[in-house]
Image (cartoon, rainbow, N blue to C red):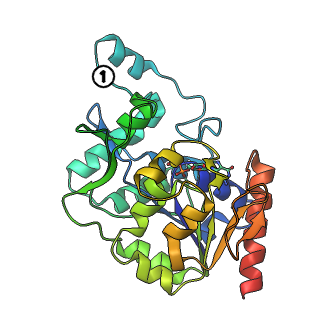
Amino acid sequence: MIAFLSGGTGTPKLLRGMRLHRKDRDLAVVVNTAEDIWISGNHLSPDVDTVIYLFAGLLDTDTWWGIRGDTLVTHDLIRARGGDEFIRIGDRDRAIHVLRGEALRRGERLTTITASLSRTLGVEARVLPMADTAVTTLIDTGGTLLHFQEYWVRHRGTVPIRELVRSYREEPVATPEVLAALREAEAVVIGPSNPVTSIAPILECRGVPEALRDQYVVAVSPFIGDRPVSGPAAALMQAFGREPTSAGTAALYGDLVDCFIQDTRDPVQVEGAVRCDTLMVDEKASGALAGEVLQILERQR
Ligand code: GDP
C-alpha cells in the first residue's frame, strides 16, 4: 500500500494517475481538513470530498471540486431568499455535507463518518482525514481574520495577506488510522498540493513528522519557477515566510523528504531533485507521472 498526503487538487490529479497502476484498495490518502467549514448549517470538508468523489468516479474534474453534472437548485433558492452562501454547493454534494454535519453533531468522529460515506459511495481506497478535531487556516488581512474559504472563494484571493494563522481549540493530533497507514505503507507520497494550506497542516499534526521520518518519502513540487501551476500558493508561501518556489517547498518539507521531484521546465534548481514532467493536463499525463513515482519507489527497493 502507498500512502499519500493530499489537498484537493494537485495530489488528487496524481491519484487519478496512480489508479491506472495500482488498485484503489492499495492506496491510503491522508487528507487536509484545515479548509473545512460549516455553511448553511452543514459541514464541508472540501479536500476530503474531492478525494472521495475521485475514487467514487463522481468528481467534476474540470474544477476538481463537487460532483460532475450536479444541480444548484437549493443553492440558487438560498441565494434568492437572501442567504449568504458564498460557495456554490451542488444539490448532490450538499447531501454529503448534511450527513456529515448531522453525524458530527451526534458526536461521531470525522474519521468514522468519512469511512461510512466512502463505503456508501463504493470507495475502496482508505480516505483518512488528518485529524478528528477542528483545525482552520485563517488569513489575517491586516486586522481582519478571514477563513481560508472566505479569502479564496469569496474574495478570490484579492485581499492583502499580513499573516497566515492556524486556528484550533485542541492541538491537532494525527488519528490512529493516519499513523497506522503511514507506518504500514511501503512509501509515502506528498503530492503537488499547496505546501502551506494543504500539506503543512498535515505535517503539523502530532505524530506525523515522526511517522514520516521512519518512511521513504517522495514529494512532488506544485511550483514551476516562482509560480504554482494553479491557485494562491505563491502569496501564501510568502505569508508563511517561505520562497514561493520548488526550493521553498523543499526547504519547508526539510529532511522529511527523501526524494524531491520538480518539473523539467522549472528554472529553479533543487539540489538532488529528480526532474519529471509534472504537468498533469489529463489522465494520461497523471498516469505517466504516477508511473515515474512508482519507478523511483522500485529503484529504492
Ligand atoms: P486545494 O486544496 O484545492 O488548494 O488543492 P491542493 O493543495 O491539493 O493543490 C493545489 C496545488 O496544486 C497548487 O499549488 C498547484 O500549483 C498544484 N497543481 C495543480 N495542478 C498541478 C499539476 O498538474 N502539476 C503540478 N506539479 N502541480 C499542480
Left or right: residue 290 versus residue 226 is right
Tag 1: residue type? Asp
- Badge 1: few (under 14), some or many (20 or more) residues near its Cα, within 10 Å? few
Residue at image location 47% in from the left, 22% down from the top: 72
Residue at image location 47% in from the left, 33% down from the top: 92
Position of residue 242 relative to residue 151, above or below, is: below
Of all residues, the one furthest to the top in this rendering is 80
Residue that numbered label 1 is attached to:
84
Residue 268 image position (x, y, % from top left): 69, 60
Residue 294 image position (x, y, % from top left): 74, 73
Residue at image location 57% in from the left, 68% down from the top: 250
Residue at image location 49% in from the left, 80% down from the top: 212
Q: Is mark 1 within 8 Å of ligand 1?
A: no
| Residue 234 in sight from this viewpoint | yes
Position of residue 216 relative to residue 3, above or below, is: below
- Count of numbered marks: 1
Residue 249 image position (x, y, % from top left): 55, 63
Position of residue 207 relative to residue 197, above or below, is: below
Residue nearer the viewer, 271 or 67: 271
Residue nearer the viewer, 300 or 177: 300
Picture quarter with the C terminus: bottom right
